[in-house]
Image (cartoon, rainbow, N blue to C red):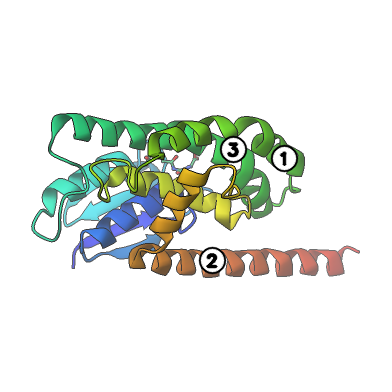
Amino acid sequence: MSITIYGSALSPFTRKVTLVAIEKGIEFVSTDLIPYNPPDNFAAMSPLKRIPILQDGDYTLNDSSAISAYLDAAYTNSSSSLIPDDPKARGYVLWIEEYTDTALFEVVSEGVFRPIFINQLLGDPLDMATVQDTVQNRLPEPLTYLENKITGKSYFSNNRLTLADISVYAQLANLEHARHLPEADEFPALMSHYGRMKELASVQHLFEREAQYLAAMLKQLQSASDVRAARDP
Ligand SMILES: N[C@@H](CCC(=O)N[C@@H](CS)C(=O)NCC(=O)O)C(=O)O
């Protein structure tokens, strides 16, 4: 086996490429790389200092969209393609991927995930005011856009699983980890799509691992903070 995905369990972009690899039946190993505590050669591995990074033999690739496109094209015999060949379907799938990677990521990451989890990781206080403002005022716009796109459909394109579905799920999963997934009655079609994604064996396996990773991380942060409090009451 020569494929390694470098990234972090809670990174939505790492989650995206990991699900692409699993859904295509590609064998790989996951190696933890946290950009906030990077290895010395991080800039050489990732010029934008971002995760995920793919290593396939002597081939290195950055960016989850580039990596997903590469895996989909390079490993064709393992299962059906996650990026359709039909030009219009292909364009649409890549657009939904781009929309979620940009509009949804920005709001979920900066407005919910960072103020809760990254703040804790960096030893800063939780910023629940930002979370509340995001949930009320910033999150509805991208969620409404996606709700309109998925209404009346099981999947975003061609009535089958594509990179678009994986990309949307990959961002929304961090809202579930942060316990801020929208209610089903607010975004019924999108939440039903989310539920459909959670039925996939690949997603169940990964979500369970992520939840364990998160619990272990929070426990470690809590004991470090208990030690500090005991030392400096
Ligand atoms: N367009 C990139 C975005 C990757 C990205 O932003 N990754 C985040 C983790 S989820 C990261 O590495 N952040 C580190 C930083 O911004 O310093 C992709 O699709 O891979």
Q: Among all residues in the image, which is located at the extreme left? A: 77
Task: State the quadrant of the C terminus.
Answer: bottom right
Residue 46 spot, x, y in % from top left: 35, 42
Residue 18 spot, x, y in % from top left: 33, 57
Q: Say what secondary structure mark 1 lies in.
A: helix
* Measured Cα–Cα span from mark 2 to mark 1: 23 Å
Tag nearer the camera, 2 or 1 = 1
Residue on which disc 2 sits: 211
Tell me if residue 34 comes above or below residue 190 in the rendering. below
Question: Which disc number belongs to residue 110?
Answer: 3
Q: Is residue 38 visible?
A: no
Q: Say what secondary structure mark 3 lies in.
A: helix
Residue on which disc 1 sits: 132
Q: Residue at x 75, y 44 (%)?
A: 128
Instruction: Tell me the amino acid under the disc marked 3.
Output: Glu
Q: Say what secondary structure mark 2 lies in.
A: helix
The disc, 2 or 3, on the residue closer to the chain's N-terminal end is 3
Q: How many residues crowd around disc 2 within 10 Å: few (fewer than 14), some, or many (20 or more)?
A: some
